[in-house]
Image (cartoon, rainbow, N blue to C red):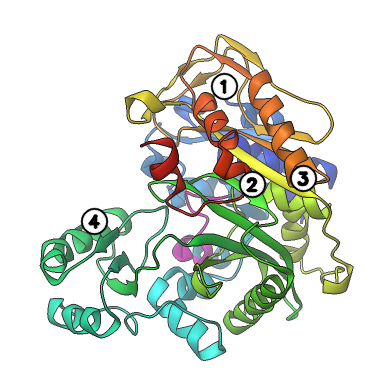
Amino acid sequence: MNKILIANRGEIAVRIIRACKEMNIKTVAVYSEIDKDAMHTRLADEAICIGPANSSKSYLNFKNIIEAASITGADCIHPGFGFLSENSQFAKICEESNIKFIGPSYKVIELMGNKSNAKELMKSAGVPVVPGSDGSIKDIAEAEKIAEKIGYPIMLKASAGGGGKGIRIVNSREELAQNYNLVRQEAKVSFNDDEIYIEKFIKNPRHVEIQILADEYGNVIHLGERDCSIQRRNQKIIEETPSTAIDDKLRNKMGDAAVKAAKASGYSSCGTIEFLVDSDKNFYFMEMNTRIQVEHPITEMRTGIDIVKNQIKIAAGEKLKLKQKNVEFRGHSIECRINAENPSKKFMPCPGTITGLNLPGGNGVRIDTAIYEGYTIPPTYDSMIAKIITHGDTRNEAISKMKRALEEIVIEGVDTNIDFLFKIITNPNFIRGNFDTSFVEKEILE
């Protein structure tokens, strides 16, 4: 592994470049025309333009990215998250082009990317799943039959879905008739795949995921859980580890189930198994993310394990040196996602030039970002511009550090969600750990 091309942008591209520098691996940044002054282009050893601002013509352009790797002599591609990170066709093209895709094989991405197929695999592996259809549903008649069997409310979900898209909650047969074709259309538009499936709607669950590392020799370990229940419209806002919703017994069961899930799929790389935990402490497999996650830093802060470096080492064919018994968990960590958006205007994105910037620091505070004073946030991509991660010996200490960091951070020139995040972490129910996935709508936006 001599040179890695990072097929991404923003803070995750910067994060990967930093890991590569520490491993003495050369890097290539790719960028769209609107990103020519982005931080990742400045930090990498080389940078090459791959097309115009529109992501379909740049960051999602297979041909241009593969050509960029060929021109620069990169023998590996790291996809980061989003864009092509879970695109099995791109992973396959990398393999056919003799370029190492830093992630699982294209066959595993394909298998786990189809949510209904993944669910069937988990059932056969003995991993608990949410009651619902056996794979994709053929027509509305089948949907009505399944809904009557498992009982309303149900969820209609895109089989190739992700990012909170292609999901509708249905409370009755009448609502099913109204929403069935709408979900299929949304799935087709968002994922170019109109297959959908049905799941029982678990009311007010906790969203808890398990981070795993798996090498190419069948060795799999987990790095504990992350609670991602603080969400707005199915998009994560704040994550923390450990979760206040589960005890050690349940934690061990979920960790074992995640390892079992990874082994059943023949997985290698870093990955995340996502579960729903209901009010009776039952947990159900939801999906597997076959990539690095936005919220990976809180696990790194708590375990001291660099997930990105391990991901690169696994792709290089190295065996995992870590054993499950050697994974140590210390303290508590929280992450807040800073978005350039205006919460008072329905979270409208707010691109523009940053005219003033002060980033917090100090013991137990980490900032992952690609912004700088004078940087112009483009209107073209996701509105997340930074992540604040704090770590303390206790949850209260981690919250106190986050409160202090949110008070310190200054981003002038654009609107952000900083005050909105501060409102959440100072909410009495959040501080008590008394929340679920409906928390933001019930407590903050009411």
Residue 85 in magenta stretch: yes
Q: Residues within 10 Å of mark 3 (few under 14, many from 20)?
A: some
Q: Closer to the N terminus: mark 4 or mark 1?
A: 1
Q: CA distance from mark 4 to mark 2?
A: 32 Å
Given contact means CB atoms under 8 Å apart, are the residues at marks 3 and 1 in contact?
no
Q: Is residue 132 left or right of residue 13?
A: left
* Near-viewer residue (51 or 335): 335
The residue at which mark 3 appears reads as 20
Q: Is residue 250 left or right of residue 234?
A: right
Count of residue discs: 4
Q: CA distance from mark 3 to mark 1?
A: 21 Å
Residue 192 in magenta stretch: no
* Near-viewer residue (313 or 253): 253
Q: Nearer the viewer, mark 4 or mark 1?
A: 4
Q: CA distance from mark 4 to mark 3?
A: 38 Å
Q: Nearer the viewer, mark 4 or mark 3?
A: 4
Q: Position of residue 369 (x, y in %)?
A: 64, 31
